[in-house]
Amino acid sequence: MKLEYKNGLLYTSIKLKYGSKIVEINNIVVDTGASFCIIEPSAIEMLGITISKDDEIETFYGVNGAYSYVKRIAESIIIDKVTLNNVEFYLGTIDENINGLLGLDVLIKSKSIINLNKMEIEIKYN
């Protein structure tokens, strides 16, 4: 899976399947400092995922302070040619022009190797 280095961050694309729909999400930051994947709600709007007042909100702390997110479970997340089923992710805003974070949960589960020499992620999941 190819990486793009811009503005000091590593970007890639993933696909997320929720229900019977699949959406490709671009401008995903590869973040080894993030425990979980976080997806910008507007990037997956066509999947019909909503947030309600009954949702449990979880708070995470980062470099720039506290952030609140709502957990969902994707039927699958597709990275490169590998499909990971029943993956938890969080809905929430990261930053302008960032559609989400590819966190350690998926990187570890997919047995990813980040190769900065080739600017790619090698997926070793079998």
Image (tube, helix red, strand yellow):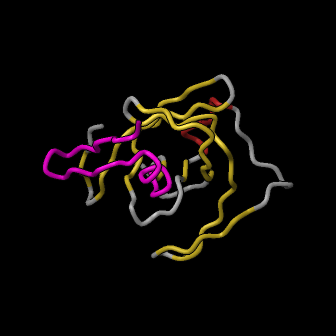
Identity of the residue drawn at 56% across and 26% down: 22
- The quadrant of the rendering that contains the N terminus is top left
Residue found 20% across the figure and 46% down from its top: 119
Q: Is residue 95 above or below residue 100?
A: below
Left or right relative to 39: residue 48:
right
Give the residue drawn at x 60%, y 68%. 67
Q: Given the current orientation, which residue lies at the most extreme left position?
A: 117
Q: Which residue is more in the foreground, 42 or 107?
A: 107
Taking the spot 39% from the left edge, 59% from the top edge, the residue there is: 31
Residue 30 drawn at (x, y percent): 37, 53
The quarter of the picture where the C terminus appears is top left
Pick the residue in front: 52 or 79: 79
Q: Which residues are magenta?
A: 102-126
Residue 40 percent across, percent down from the top left: 55, 48
Residue 36 pos. (x, y %) = 53, 57
**In the drawing, does residue 122 fall left or right of residue 69?**
left
